[in-house]
Amino acid sequence: MKNPLVAVGLVLSLVLAGGVSYYASSQPDGLEKVAGDVGFLDSAEESAVKDSPLAEYGVAGIENERLSGGLAGVIGVASTAAISFGLFYALRRFKKEES
């Protein structure tokens, strides 16, 4: 990477996703809490991706919830960064060819 700020940002994002998620609350998220308070939580349907490898903010097959959540965060950040860098690279090449 040519830009050290991007590299530092990526490393910081990975550390936060993997480490800080260790301390995440086990309480329901805001939407789930409001659904319970308002009374429509019982009408919720199962997600179509409930059996996916990264469902429920964790990695399937890893029993330790904190490790599973941290790893899911790292996978999420890494995949988002890879897609973003790929798109930016493609757009940059497209712009050069256009000139």
Image: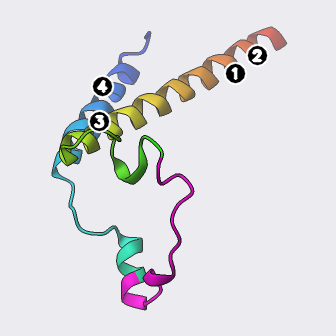
Which range is magenta? 36-51
Q: Earlier in the sequence, mark 4 or mark 1?
A: 4
Residue at 36%, 22% in the rendered image: 5
Q: Quadrant of the C terminus?
A: top right
Alpha carbon of mark 3 to alpha carbon of mark 2: how far? 34 Å
Residue at 36%, 16% in the rendered image: 4
Horizontal arrangement in the rendering, residue 88 relative to residue 22 (left or right): right
Viewer-proximal residue among 26 and 97: 26
Q: Secondary structure at mark 1?
A: helix
Q: Which residue corresponds to mark 4?
A: 11
Amino acid type at image mark 4: Val
Q: Earlier in the sequence, mark 3 or mark 4?
A: 4
Tag 3 near tag 2, CB within 8 Å: no
Q: Which residue corresponds to mark 1?
A: 91
Alpha carbon of mark 3 to alpha carbon of mark 1: how far? 30 Å
Let me know if residue 87 appears in the view: yes
The image quadrant of residue 54 is: top left
Q: Secondary structure at mark 4?
A: helix
Alpha carbon of mark 1 to alpha carbon of mark 2: how far? 5 Å
Q: Which mark is residue 94?
A: 2
Residue at 35%, 78% in the rendered image: 33
Alpha carbon of mark 4 to alpha carbon of mark 1: how far? 24 Å
Numbered-mark total = 4
